[in-house]
Each structure stands twice: as structure tokens, then as C-alpha cells.
Image (cartoon, grey):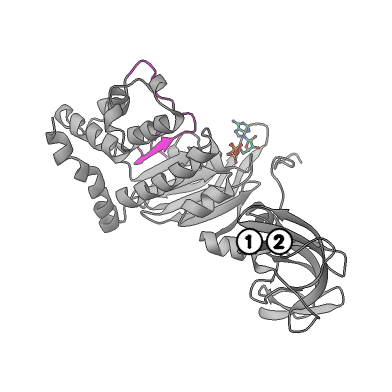
């Protein structure tokens, strides 16, 4: 009974080494477009490289084109234009089942009449290169990987949502794809379970070393799990980078707003050279990060609430301006302190509650410090729109 487990777990785990050695599971997308009948453009010219073994997320609001991109990678949807290369091979003519990819959907799509073991084994029955004698070892190994060995004999309706999702993962992993596509796989689960599965999924991906392309509209999920992520809007990638980079240096109002809480302010940019420059916020001059090639003039600046500090006392020091506390919202470990700036803009600061007493109350005068390294002027050129409200259409 123990032989298969003893022999086979390394087989899936060995993919880590294989992928690393061969660069297996790399994706190159060039000029990818999808226009549906009726003129709706779901994907509008995407260029993207995903490295072998990377955990990559496509993040964006409903209707921005994430799923259509994933479906083209899987082969379920034909591109109108552009190329998809997996490990350097153009897969345009490759049917879905022959691509080195597998997909995990939000709806687990498990067969209700089969037990867990048979559900996982199902795909292997059609895999011509897997001898029948090898199936048991592979299924056992996949179940072990998602820590569901002891549930092998249960039917899907005897499992929780999280357990069913782990079986769906095992079923995809057992085929040893180079790339695993995940379409909102945690979307159907409650918040607590989603949190714990995020960590499990990330750790699983690290162990198997397969490239993951993960679709989500949940920014926390994408920030927590991904090596890199692409923020999409209206069929385009509008920013791409590591989670920290995108969160801290959003290039557009759309990205700043979509990823967490952002303080957005109207400013007058005085300096047009890249790097630290000067902006005017009402009557106050502040140092801020200015994008390359920025033309002096009116603009928008952003700072995250955790970077906006409140201080007591008279106004003195750089990058500070006077403010009035309007409202304090207690959140347990932190409080949101809303303050009004002299030009009328309302901004918020996230204050850690290390002491018993709330340090601020409404009506308090304070000074706001916005460190120059955290205050960014947004680029003029970046398009931002919620795609659901304004779908891209040729006719439009
Ligand atoms: P969600 O998070 O809601 O799944 P998404 O970002 O994955 O959204 P897509 O499903 O890729 O978005 O859809 C992108 C756009 O393409 C939407 O405006 C959608 O209405 C449109 N679309 C998707 N499938 C079709 C189709 N088969 N025919 C016509 N339009 C479609």
C-alpha cells in the first residue's frame, strides 16, 4: 500500500528541478487581442512574459479581460490576433488538451458520482503517455501534495468547499503541466477559508515549481501570493510589476485606487525633471516623486495612509502642512484618522494602536507629514477606467 507514496511524491516534486533546468513553463504573449462577435474587444493588445516557475497574477475589475486572456492561454478561446508561446513554441494550432497547461476553475467541476481518488485519476485515463500501472502512484502523490490522502474514498458532496478546491488542484497537478492556470480558484470560498488557502496555495506552488497564472479581482489575494502581477483595465495591462512596487508606486489613479486605500490630491507640479521634484498643494510646497518626462502643471499626487503621518505641535519641518482631525475610526490594531487639509482635501492616516488611549479625536489640530519618498505624482498618460462601466467597443 505504501509503495506508491514512497516512490511517487518526488515525481511531481521533481518538476521543480526539471522546470528550473529546462526553463519549462515560460510564457511569452505578443500583441494578443480578442474581439468577440458584435465588436466587443475583451483583450486589446497584450504583451507579457511570465518566467518559468513564477507565480503570476492577472488582477482587475470584472470585465477587464482577465478570464479571456486565461482562456486563450488554455486554448478554449482563439485569439483574433497575436501570439502565445509556451516554452518558445507557438501554441496557436495546439488544441487545449495537447498544451502543457491545465486549468483550475472557481467551480470545482468535480464528478459527483466518483470518489475523490477517481476524480483525481480521471484525467490520467486519457493521458496516452502515462502507463496504466503508473496511475496509482501519481494519484496518491497528488493527493499527498494537497494533503487530502485520508479523504480519497469520499464523494465530493462529503467535502467542504476548501477540500473540494484542493481536489480540483490535485486533479490538475496530477497531469504534471508546466503551467497551471487558476481562474478565481478561491472565489467561491468564505473569507476565512480563502485566507488559509492562499498560504497553502503559495507554498504548494513553491514546492512544485510549476508556473502559476492566477486570475483574481481581489487585490489582497494578488498582493499576498504573486511574484509579479499585471493590473488590467479595459483589455489592457496598465501596470506590471512586483506587488510591493505596484502598491507603493502606482502609476495611475486607477491602480492607486484599485489596490488598497489611496489618498489622492490635486497638486501643481513645479518641477518637470524626473526624480524628486516640487509640487504645490494649495499654498504649501512639498517634495515629491515626479515621473520621468512629466510636464510641469496641474496633476494628481498619491500617498498611502500608512505613509501619511500625524504629528502634534506647531508647524515646522519639511513636507508638512497643518490639518484638522475630522473623524477617527477604530479598527482594533489600527485606527483610520481622517483629516482635512488647508485646501479642503480630506485624507486619511493609518495609525497603529500601540497605546490604550486613542491619540487623536475630532477637532484636534495637527500637522501632516508626507515623506517625499512616499508622495508620488501620477503619470498623465495612463488610461484609467472601470471596464464594466465603459466596455471597450469598436462601435463606441
Ligand atoms: P470577471 O472577473 O467578471 O470574470 P474578466 O476580467 O475575467 O471579468 P472577461 O470574462 O475576460 O473579463 O470579459 C472581458 C469582456 O469581454 C467583458 O466585457 C465581457 O462582457 C466580454 N466577453 C466575454 N466573453 C464574451 C463572449 N463570449 N462574447 C462577447 N463578449 C464577451
* Few, some or many residues within 10 Å of mark 2 (<14, 14–19, 20+): some
Q: Is residue 23 visible?
A: yes
Viewer-nearest residue: 172 or 199? 199
Q: Is residue 80 visible?
A: no
- Residue 135 placed where, x, y %? 20, 30
Q: Residue at x 44, y 38 (%)?
A: 74
- Quadrant containing ligand 1: top right
Viewer-nearest residue: 259 or 193? 193
Is the CB atom of the residue marked by disc 1 within 8 angstroms of ligand 1's nearest atom? no
* Few, some or many residues within 10 Å of mark 1 (<14, 14–19, 20+): some
- Residue at mark 2: 358
- Residue at mark 1: 353
* Element assignment for label 2: loop
- Report the magenta residues as a range: 93-114
Q: Quadrant of the C terminus?
A: top right
Residue furthest top as drawn:
113
Q: Exactly how many numbered labels are in the figure?
A: 2
Q: Main secondary structure of the magenta part?
A: loop
Circles 1 and 2: CB atoms closer than 8 Å = yes
Viewer-nearest residue: 179 or 218? 218
Q: Left of 214 or right of it: where is 384?
A: right
Q: Left of 61 or right of it: where is 73?
A: left
- Residue 234 placed where, x, y %? 66, 46
Q: Left of 259 or right of it: where is 269?
A: right
Residue furthest bottom as drawn:
317
* Element assignment for label 1: loop
- Residue 291 placed where, x, y %? 67, 72
Which picture quadrant has residue 218? top right
Amino acid at each position: 500500500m505504501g509503495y506508491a507514496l514512497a516512490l511517487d511524491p518526488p515525481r511531481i516534486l521533481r518538476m521543480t528541478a526539471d522546470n528550473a533546468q529546462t526553463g519549462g513553463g515560460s510564457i511569452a504573449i505578443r500583441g494578443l487581442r480578442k474581439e468577440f462577435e458584435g465588436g466587443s474587444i475583451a483583450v486589446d493588445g497584450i504583451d507579457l512574459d511570465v518566467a518559468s516557475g513564477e507565480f503570476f497574477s492577472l488582477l482587475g475589475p470584472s470585465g477587464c479581460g482577465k478570464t479571456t486572456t486565461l482562456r486563450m492561454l488554455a486554448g478554449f478561446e482563439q485569439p483574433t490576433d497575436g501570439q502565445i508561446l509556451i516554452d518558445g513554441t507557438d501554441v496557436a494550432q495546439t488544441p487545449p488538451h495537447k498544451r502543457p497547461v491545465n486549468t483550475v476553475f472557481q467551480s470545482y467541476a468535480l464528478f459527483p458520482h466518483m470518489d475523490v481518488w477517481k476524480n483525481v485519476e480521471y484525467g490520467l485515463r486519457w493521458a496516452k503517455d502515462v502507463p496504466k500501472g503508473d496511475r496509482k502512484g501519481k494519484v496518491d502523490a497528488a493527493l499527498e501534495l494537497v494533503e487530502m490522502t485520508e479523504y480519497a474514498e469520499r464523494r465530493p458532496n462529503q467535502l467542504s468547499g476548501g477540500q473540494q478546491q484542493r481536489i480540483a488542484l490535485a486533479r490538475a497537478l496530477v497531469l504534471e503541466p508546466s503551467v497551471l492556470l487558476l481562474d478565481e480558484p478561491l472565489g467561491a470560498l468564505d473569507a476565512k477559508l480563502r485566507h488559509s488557502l492562499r498560504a497553502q496555495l503559495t507554498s504548494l506552488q513553491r514546492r512544485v515549481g510549476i508556473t502559476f497564472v492566477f486570475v483574481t479581482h481581489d487585490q489582497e489575494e494578488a498582493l499576498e501570493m504573486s511574484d509579479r502581477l499585471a493590473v488590467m483595465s479595459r483589455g489592457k495591462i496598465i501596470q506590471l510589476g512586483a506587488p510591493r512596487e505596484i502598491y507603493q508606486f502606482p502609476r495611475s489613479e486607477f491602480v492607486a485606487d484599485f489596490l488598497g486605500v489611496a489618498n489622492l490630491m490635486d497638486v501643481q507640479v513645479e518641477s518637470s525633471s524626473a526624480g524628486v521634484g516640487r509640487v504645490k498643494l494649495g499654498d504649501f510646497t512639498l517634495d515629491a516623486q515626479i515621473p520621468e518626462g512629466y510636464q510641469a502643471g496641474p496633476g494628481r499626487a498619491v500617498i498611502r495612509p500608512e505613509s501619511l503621518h500625524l504629528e502634534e505641535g506647531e508647524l515646522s519641518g519639511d513636507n508638512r502642512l497643518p490639518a484638522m482631525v475630522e473623524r477617527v475610526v477604530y479598527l482594533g490594531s489600527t485606527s483610520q484618522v481622517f483629516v482635512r487639509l488647508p485646501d479642503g482635501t480630506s485624507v486619511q492616516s493609518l495609525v497603529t494602536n500601540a497605546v490604550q488611549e486613542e491619540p487623536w479625536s475630532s477637532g484636534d489640530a495637527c500637522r501632516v507629514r508626507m515623506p517625499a519618498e512616499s508622495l508620488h505624482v501620477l503619470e498623465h498618460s495612463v488610461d484609467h477606467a472601470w471596464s464594466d462601466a465603459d466596455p471597450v467597443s469598436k462601435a463606441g
